[in-house]
Structure formats: structure tokens, C-alpha cells
Amino acid sequence: MAKKSGSLKSTLAVSLNNYLDAGAIVAGSSGITLWQNYLGLSEMHLGWLNALSANALGAAIGAIIGGFLADKFGRKFIFTYNLLVYMLGVLIIMLSFSYPMLLCGFLVTGISVGIGVPASWTYISESSEVSNRGRNICISQMSWGIGPMLILFFGMLFAPGNDVDPNGPLYGMVVSIAHFFGGADMSIEAVNAFSSRVVFFTLFVVAFVAWNLQRQLQESAEFKANKEKDKSGIVDNIKMLFTNRVAVRSVIFLATIYLTWNLVASVMGFFMPHVYETAGGLSNKMANMLSCVSWVFVVVTTFIISFFVDKVAHRLFYVIGLAAALTAWILVIGGSITSIAGIWIFTILWGINNGSSVQVFYALWGSELFPAKFRAGAQGLMFFIVRGLSAVWGLVFTFIYGENGEGFTLAAYCMVALLAIALVVGLIGMPNTRGRSLEEITKERYGDNF
């Protein structure tokens, strides 16, 4: 196969999907208390928003569809149409005036996120040089960090204040927009919800830009080469995925490490500002600011790792990320989340974890450990499993956490247990793929027939 070139440009274009994925989750979380006050929602209502969003079931549904479609019709097929669905979902959220409408917007956006993720990670790996595959996945992860960082920054600018904390610098603009569309007699809760609508509008703009960039990409050369020699359909690929022992073992390994880590990360991705406000007693603006700082550490950590991930054993960075996560939650068990110093330490450690996270290696190994014919489909299946169970966990978490954070310590014990499983299983099953081509890895694992 011809040597790949110019992978950085295509990686940047496709990585915008990660921006939109994490951005959708955090846009919802940054304004969740505002929507709660505006629509009179309970913690259970919030749990369902999380469960059907890009954070969980919505993405799960999209992934199982998008993965196999990407293997059948191509990675570019997904890039050509999927973000139109994303923009529709965001538009529904922006125009929401009831809980069912808001829930629908979260679901449609989540489905689009799920459709795009398997194709994105697969395309990045297939388009990368052997010496830059890990780096390009890290760039994608940086985009996953930059999205929330900017969304939370916007949320802080537009956020309403409270008795002890002033309004965000651009809150006056939010008030003007709200009164323009809703009239001067709007309730304060309805006005405040407009700050979240404006944040979602920024995602609509980025999605439009990303859609135009991705439509211009060339199809993956590896996908085209595989299609020339293999005419199997979606059903055939599903059968092979579920009957090939190597593939099944790979699915079990990757799904286990990603699920246990993501059950923790999905909760924090959606509920982190809410936790700061209830358990930490912070204002909406301060909660968004601290969450934004956490994502700064995500971006910085991933940027540093990107220079070494193709040269240094993956084991080192895998352990660093999970060690930071475990330390953060152990400190929570000790009661640190109730003090401002403890909140800062937790924020920094969780940012380091996300920067050197299981997700980086899941995205890398997930595209390396499967042949091209069902590479995206396998990732879609695993994403479906992980995000689907995350939806259930999001609902369970609301019961454990309680209305005002009274169960947060118990939740922390659950988080420590899940992260410990991800660490142990990852160290036991970690593959040796660094510095090897996808073709070489596939031949070694599956033989010449793939």
C-alpha cells in the first residue's frame, strides 16, 4: 500500500468530531442547573437527560449503526452526512421550551455523536503514518479536551451569578437576547436558560465548519484496498466479529477497560459542574470555571504525551492517567471535595487523568486490533456497550448521589473500584502494537485471510 502522507491535516479535520462529542456533553452539563430551574426538573429528569444524550444511550445507538455503515459504505460516507443530524439535534435544544423537546434534542445529538466516533478514530488510524499513529490519536484527544474547555469558558462568560458571585461578563448580552425572543416579562429562570442556548449555538457553528471540511476528505486508502478484495456485507462482518476468537477476545478486553473508566468519566463529564454546585457549594459560574480549568490540564497533558506516545511504552502513560484518577477519588473519600483546596486538587488530578486517559489507548488499540473489514463495526459495537451501560449507570448515580450530594462519598467508593478494574485489566491485556503497521498487526493476529 502506498505510504500515507499529510495525515496531520486530515486528523485535524476529523478531530473536530471529538470536539463536538465532548462539547455536546459539557454544554449540557454546564447549563443543566439552569434548565432544571427553568423547567422545574428533578434529579431523575436530569438522569434521563444524561442517559439519552451524547454521554450515554444516544451515542450508543448511533455507534452500533455508524460503525457497520462505515465498514460497508466508507468512512467518508459518514463524514458527508452525519453532522447534518448533529446540527438538527443542537437546533432542537436551542429552541426547547419543554422537557420532552429538550430530551429529544439531547437524543438526536447523541445519536449523531455515536455515528461519528467509530468512523473518526478508524479514519485517523488508517490515514496515519506508522510513526505518528499515536500522535494523531492524541491530537484527536486534545480536541476532545479543547471542546469542553471552550464550552465551559463560554458558559462562564454567559452564566448568571448568585448572592455571592457576580454575573458572567457577557450575561447582559444573554438577557438582551432572551428579551428579544421571549419578551420583557420572561421569568428570571427562562432568561438564565438562554445562556445555555447561546452555548449550544457555538456548537452549531463548529459543526457547520467541520461538516464542510470533512466533506472534502479523501476516502481511507486502506478501506478502498480492502473493498477491492473483499465483498462481504454488513451481516457477514457482524458474523465474523462475533465468531472469530481473536476478535471476541479483543472486544472483551477493550470493552472492559473502556467501560470501567467511562462509567466514571461519563458521570463527571455530565455532572461535574452540578457536583461542584451541590456538593461543593459553588455558583454556576465558579463551577464552570473549575471544570474549564480541568480541561486545560487535559489538553496540556495530552499535548505532552503526543510527543512520546509513539516512542515510549504505552504502559507508562496508561498507569499515570489511572493513578491520577484513583488519587483524586481517594481524596474525595477523605472529604476533600468540601474545601476549596480539595476541589482544586481534585480538578487538577482529574484533568491529568483525562489527558492520559484510557480513552486515548482505547481509541488507538481499538483501531489496531481489528482488520479493516470490521474495524469501525467493532468499535461501534464496543461504543454501544460502553455508552449504553453508561446510560444505566447515569440513572443509578442520581440515586446514589442524592438530591444535594449526600451520597457523594458512597459514589466515590464505586468510582475507585471501577478505576482499579480498568488499571488491572489494562496492565494484564495490554497489546504490543507500537511502531507496527496496521497491516502487520492484522496479519499477525488474524492470518493472511484478512
Image (cartoon, helix red, strand yellow):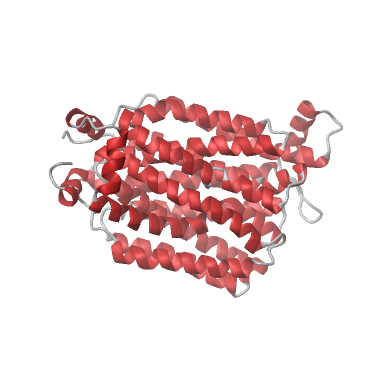
- As drawn, is 256 to the left or to the right of 161? left
Q: Residue at x 70, y 49 (%)?
A: 33
Q: Residue at x 37, y 65 (%)?
A: 319
For the N terminus, the quadrant is top left
The one of 160 and 53 positioned closer to us in this rendering: 53
Quarter location, residue 439: top left
Q: Is residue 20 visible?
A: yes
| In the image, farthest residue toward the bottom | 334
Q: Residue at x 35, y 51 (%)?
A: 306
Vertical placement of 179 versus 110: above or below?
above
Q: Position of residue 433 (x, y in %)?
A: 23, 54
The one of 377 and 30 positioned closer to us in this rendering: 377
Q: Position of residue 360 (x, y in %)?
A: 38, 52
Vertical placement of 423 versus 4: above or below?
below
The one of 78 and 345 positioned closer to us in this rendering: 78
- As drawn, is 432 to the left or to the right of 317? left
The one of 1 and 444 positioned closer to us in this rendering: 444
Q: Is residue 19 visible?
A: no
Q: Position of residue 318 (x, y in %)?
A: 36, 61
Q: Residue at x 36, y 61 (%)?
A: 317
Q: Position of residue 127 (x, y in %)?
A: 28, 37
For the C terminus, the quadrant is top left
